[in-house]
Image (cartoon, grey):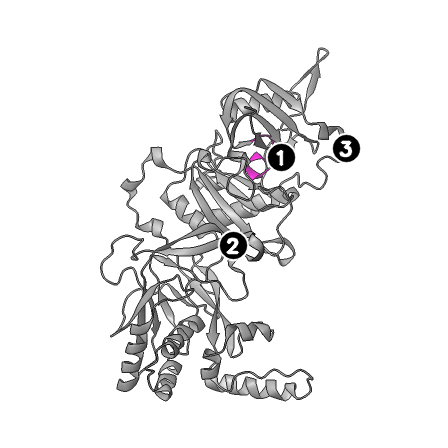
């Protein structure tokens, strides 16, 4: 057995998965087998007093197989900052990371409990190879990007829990686990056979590309050159599916550390995708996020909207799923999950597990939890994602997604009852606690196609609903109120949303 333990000194691990951009907000966790090997090769080349290269080669090829991983407790985070570029302009950098237990930024843990451990159960080293690997581990300064300060040590053995392993071919896995794809090396014979076939094909090509001669060359390849030559993955590597058990940092927080008065009620996700969905698909995006959170939380009532016996929750205390277009380009770039009753530690754990939501036409939505608190912490009118107007505080509000009636208006004794305006006032009283002083339809409703293209009916589930006629409104309150405000049919799934309008000073 070979086991290497890594500890992240700043409590953070930064690493962008192969094929993705840093601003997509994705983190490769656990580190791929390919990344672990390249980190050790890099330590060899950085040291002027290098170890004997043939011995380093034979040592590292012993751990070229698929490791098992023991993972520290983690949670996801990110920073946003502007970087200067040529010409004096600035570009916004979205830097996602995994915060690990046991680092300088984490909780104090007993020795070894905050470490990432990679284990190769069937690998064996000779005495001189073990000395070489011990020295290589001692020289490691970071793992992932350069800001992921780390130290590594070769263990004498490991008999603790395993949290990540290659997925089983029969698919028999724990439903709570998540799938990740990690890059790993081919074995020596596989690479030799692949390279021979590739070079045979290159004889008929005008522009020839030659992969490295062997796996040692693969590990020492220049990534910039690999990308320039157009390789979809580095030559000599393959994607391996791993199953990762949950190890959320929230699971290690004592129950007594969060009281009912301190429960967060508002979670905010940033969305990354090759094609961001249009705001008109808000209902569909919200339904898919709800399904994901119900699965991650094992059917928690706050996400499902009903108890385990099927009894519906009353009073709008369960989650609203509110996709938003915070930069005003007509596409969904964030989604908020708001539950006035609050998220307990198990709901928080489920929120932290969400990584991806199925997207139409193969464009999956990658989600990063960027905020967890209360609506007033994230309300504002700025553009670019730093704040969201659905959680603003104002006396004036306007529709941003269509309002759908829950009851049919009726004409009795010559007067209309249950009009759209009546239903808006009543819904505001139930949700906000105060009725608006004025309710006026937006001028856009005078056009027959004002809300053209919006999804107006849930694919699953029910809910009181009168017709497909969409409405938009402007609301004026006597006092400032704090959002979110979502009213009418489908309000828990992105319909009937209002945004705060900045009050005039």
Residue 84's disc number: 2
Q: Is residue 35 above or below residue 91?
A: below
**Residue named by callout 1:** 400
Name the quarter where the N terminus is drawn. Answer: bottom left
Which residue lies most toward the right here? 448
202 horizontally vs 306: left or right: right
Which residue lies most toward the top here? 413
Mark 3: which secondary structure?
loop
Q: CA distance from mark 3 to mark 2?
A: 46 Å
Q: CA distance from mark 1 to mark 3?
A: 17 Å
The segment highlighted magenta reads 486-494
| Residue 297 belongs to magenta span | no
| N-term mark: 1 or 3 | 1
Residue 448's disc number: 3
Which residue lies most toward the left here? 110
Residue 435's disc number: none
Q: Pick the residue in front: 502 or 300.
A: 502
Which residue lies most toward the front here? 87
| Residue 492 belongs to magenta span | yes
Location of residue 357 in the rendering, given as x and y in whole percent from the top left corner: 54, 52
Q: Residues within 10 Å of mark 1 (few under 14, many from 20)?
A: many
Q: Residues within 10 Å of mark 3 (few under 14, many from 20)?
A: few
Name the quarter where the C terminus is drawn. Answer: top right
| Eye-nearest disc, 1 or 2 | 2
Q: Pick the residue in front: 408 or 260.
A: 260
């Amino acid at each position: 057995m070979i086991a290497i333990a890594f500890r992240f000194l700043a409590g953070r691990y930064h690493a962008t998965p192969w094929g993705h951009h840093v601003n997509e907000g994705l983190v490769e966790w656990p580190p791929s087998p390919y990344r672990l090997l390249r980190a050790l090769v890099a330590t060899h080349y950085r040291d002027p007093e290098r170890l004997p290269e043939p011995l380093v080669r034979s040592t590292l090829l012993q751990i070229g197989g698929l490791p098992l991983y023991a993972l520290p407790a983690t949670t996801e985070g990110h920073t946003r900052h502007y970087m200067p570029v040529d010409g004096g302009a600035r570009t916004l950098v979205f830097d996602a990371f995994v915060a690990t237990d046991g680092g300088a930024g984490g909780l104090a843990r007993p020795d070894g409990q905050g470490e990432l451990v990679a284990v190769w159960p069937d690998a064996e080293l000779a005495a001189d190879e073990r000395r070489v690997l011990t020295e290589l581990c001692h020289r490691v300064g970071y793992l992932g990007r350069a800001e992921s300060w780390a130290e590594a040590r070769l263990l004498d053995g490991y008999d603790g829990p395993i949290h990540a392993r290659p997925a089983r071919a029969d698919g028999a896995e724990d439903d709570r686990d998540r799938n990740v794809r990690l890059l790993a090396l081919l074995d020596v014979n596989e690479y030799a056979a692949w390279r021979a076939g590739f070079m045979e094909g290159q004889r008929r090509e005008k522009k020839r590309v030659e992969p490295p001669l062997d796996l040692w060359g693969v590990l020492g390849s220049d990534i910039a050159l690999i990308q320039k030559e157009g390789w979809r993955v580095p030559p000599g590597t393959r994607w391996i599916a791993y199953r990762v058990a949950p190890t959320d940092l929230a699971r290690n927080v004592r129950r007594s550390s969060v009281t009912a008065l301190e429960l967060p009620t508002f979670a905010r996700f940033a969305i990354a995708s090759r094609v961001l969905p249009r705001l008109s698909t808000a209902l569909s995006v919200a339904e898919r996020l709800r399904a994901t959170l119900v699965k991650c939380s094992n059917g928690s009532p706050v996400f499902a909207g009903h108890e385990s016996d099927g009894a519906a929750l009353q009073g709008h205390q369960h989650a609203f799923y509110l996709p938003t277009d915070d930069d005003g380009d007509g596409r969904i770039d964030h989604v908020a999950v708001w539950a006035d009753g609050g998220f307990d530690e198990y709901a928080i754990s489920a929120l932290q597990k969400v990584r991806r939501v199925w997207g139409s036409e193969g464009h999956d939505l990658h989600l990063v939890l960027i905020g967890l608190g209360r609506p007033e912490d994230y309300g504002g009118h700025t553009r670019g994602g730093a704040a969201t107007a659905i959680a603003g505080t104002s006396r004036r509000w306007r529709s941003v997604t269509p309002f759908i009636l829950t009851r049919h208006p009726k004409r009795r004794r010559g007067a209309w009852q249950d009009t759209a305006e009546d239903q808006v006032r009543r819904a505001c009283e139930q949700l906000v606690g105060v009725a608006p002083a004025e309710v006026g339809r937006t001028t856009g409703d005078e056009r027959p196609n004002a809300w053209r293209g919006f999804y107006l009916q849930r694919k699953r589930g029910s809910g009181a609903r009168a017709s497909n006629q969409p409405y938009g409104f402007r609301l004026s309150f006597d006092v400032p109120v704090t959002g979110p405000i979502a009213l009418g049919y489908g309000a828990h799934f992105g319909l009937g949303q209002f945004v705060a309008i900045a009050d005039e000073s």
